[in-house]
Image (cartoon, helix red, strand yellow):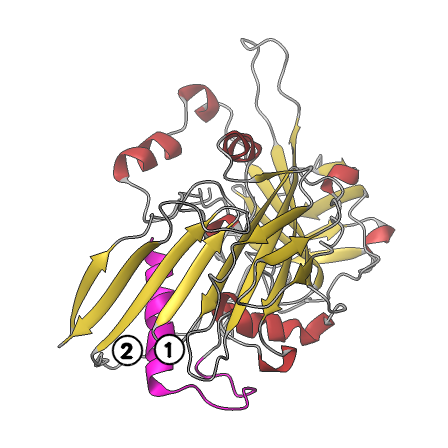
């Protein structure tokens, strides 16, 4: 079963992972997880496999081109598909998924267990030099900065010891429902077949999975709700010193939207911002969410309603503080799509009737996009839209201070 983030408080983790006794009696022996994503770069056509450019933005250079591809902001543009199957009857045994012709990947896709990861050398001790980084946190759509903002935290490393002053709101907890690479699972894409789906591909139609130990009944039909979502047609207007206007067309089947941004004003000052009406909504939200979380966070105004078509980033929060006036920022956006769950046989209407399901299929959908602000497209690279200190495509390498600041910022954002 999917694990939950290690940062989850123990009491909450126990409440979330404990399975009710009634559910334990009907444990599903074979489970299939299908993630259906569409990713784009605002103002740019589909980069295809050249989408590695986006991968550099995400800092995922070490992620192989196999499973998974659709997490967070995918490292390639266009339509992206991930499939994972766990068959408790024969764990880690390959299978074959027969797909509709409209998917345009051939008659079937091989689901293959991953190879054992190579051993890693023990890293050498790293000496952290003295440095200082300040992060300012803003939230909410609107041209002006709201009262009580920003929240600010400054991190200083002195003689190997971390000191902090101030604080920012901790990230909202997002349950981790992703399926990670594990030899007990059969996955696609994989080393045997890593074919990309095309812009014309569709999930609609009949799917069937067969293999050693796979239930013969594992056959299901997917409708439009489980298909690839349209791209987000995001447009931006304004410079880093301006109130930046974000606008987009409604995305078909979107249940809600979320936008977050990040800016590097100079080598020591960073800014994070989100479209939420409350502090603490961050990069973790740019992923699949359950319907219950979408409904809850719409009510709490963490997410933007599906009727929303514009949002304004407050004036001047991304403005560069460098002597040369140069700066850069990135904006990430997600449209949350519907989730489809199919179980066979279906749950009886009578809750007291015996029920022993053979399999379950979950299909999640989303559409994401990224836009760069204040920088030429040829200068891009690094995690979450931030420059990467090892990016060989940059015209000028970052200074040592910039590189240290970016590394510390990544660690900071992952810890909240």
> Which residue is located at x 55 percent, y 48 percent?
142
Q: Is residue 21 above or below residue 330?
A: above
- Residue 169 x, y percent position in the rendering: 34, 48
Contact (Cβ within 8 Å) of mark 2 with mark 1: no
Task: Indicate yes or no whether the magenta region holds residue 393.
Answer: yes
- Residue 159 x, y percent position in the rendering: 13, 77
> Which residue is located at x 51 percent, y 42 percent?
88
User: Which label belongs to residue 122?
Assistant: 2
- Residue 233 x, y percent position in the rendering: 74, 56
The magenta stretch is 389-416
> Which residue is located at x 61 percent, y 49 percent?
311
Give the side of residue 140 with respect to residue 158, left or right: right
Identify the residue at the far bottom of this view: 396
Nearer-the-camera pick, 72 or 94: 72
Give the side of residue 318 with respect to residue 373, left or right: left
Give the side of residue 61 with respect to residue 54, left or right: left
Quarter location, residue 12: top left
- Residue 87 x, y percent position in the rendering: 56, 44
Q: SS of the residue at dot 1?
A: loop
Nearer-the-camera pick, 374 or 103: 374
Q: Is residue 395 above or below residue 74?
A: below
User: Which label belongs to residue 267?
Assistant: 1
Q: Answer whether residue 131 is visible to the viewer in this image.
A: yes
Q: SS of the residue at dot 2?
A: loop
Q: How many numbered dots are placed on residues in this image?
A: 2
Mark-to-mark CA distance, 2 and 1: 30 Å
Task: Indicate yes or no whether the magenta region holds residue 50.
Answer: no
């Amino acid at each position: 079963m999917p694990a939950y983030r290690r940062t989850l408080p123990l009491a909450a983790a126990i409440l979330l992972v404990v399975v009710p006794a009634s559910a334990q009696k009907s444990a599903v022996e074979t489970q299939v997880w299908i993630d259906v994503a569409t990713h784009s770069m605002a103002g740019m056509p589909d980069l295809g496999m050249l989408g590695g450019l986006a991968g550099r933005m995400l800092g995922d250079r070490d992620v192989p081109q196999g499973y998974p591809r659709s997490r967070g902001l995918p490292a390639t543009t266009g339509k992206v598909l991930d499939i994972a199957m766990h068959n408790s009857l024969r764990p880690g045994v390959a299978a074959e998924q027969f797909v509709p012709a409209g998917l345009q990947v051939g008659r079937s896709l091989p689901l293959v267990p991953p190879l054992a990861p190579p051993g890693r050398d023990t890293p050498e001790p790293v000496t952290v030099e003295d440095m200082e980084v300040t992060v300012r946190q803003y939230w909410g759509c609107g041209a002006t900065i709201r009262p009580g903002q920003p929240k600010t935290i400054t991190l200083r490393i002195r003689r190997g010891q971390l000191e902090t002053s101030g604080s920012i709101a901790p990230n909202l907890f997002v349950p981790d429902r992703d399926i990670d690479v594990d030899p007990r699972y059969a996955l696609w894409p994989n080393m045997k077949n890593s074919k990309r789906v095309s812009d014309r591909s569709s999930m609609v139609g009949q799917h069937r999975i067969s293999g050693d130990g796979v239930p013969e009944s594992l056959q299901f039909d997917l409708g439009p709700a489980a298909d690839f979502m349209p791209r987000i047609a995001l447009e931006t207007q304004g410079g880093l010193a301006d109130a930046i206007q974000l606008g987009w067309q409604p995305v078909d089947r979107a249940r809600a939207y979320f936008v977050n941004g990040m800016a590097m004003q100079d080598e020591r000052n960073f800014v994070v911002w989100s479209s939420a009406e409350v502090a603490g909504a961050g990069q973790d939200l740019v992923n699949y969410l359950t319907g219950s979380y979408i409904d809850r966070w719409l009510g709490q105004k963490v997410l933007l309603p599906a009727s929303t078509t514009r949002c304004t980033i407050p004036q001047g929060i991304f403005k560069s503080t460098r002597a040369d006036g140069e700066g850069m920022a990135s904006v990430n956006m997600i449209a949350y799509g519907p989730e489809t769950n199919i179980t066979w046989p279906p749950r009886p209407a009578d809750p007291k009737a015996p029920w022993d399901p053979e399999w379950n299929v979950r299909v999640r959908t989303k559409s994401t996009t990224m836009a760069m602000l204040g920088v030429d497209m040829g200068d891009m690279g690094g995690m979450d839209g931030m420059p990467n200190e090892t990016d060989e495509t940059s015209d000028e390498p970052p200074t040592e201070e910039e590189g240290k600041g970016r590394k510390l910022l990544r660690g900071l954002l992952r810890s909240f």
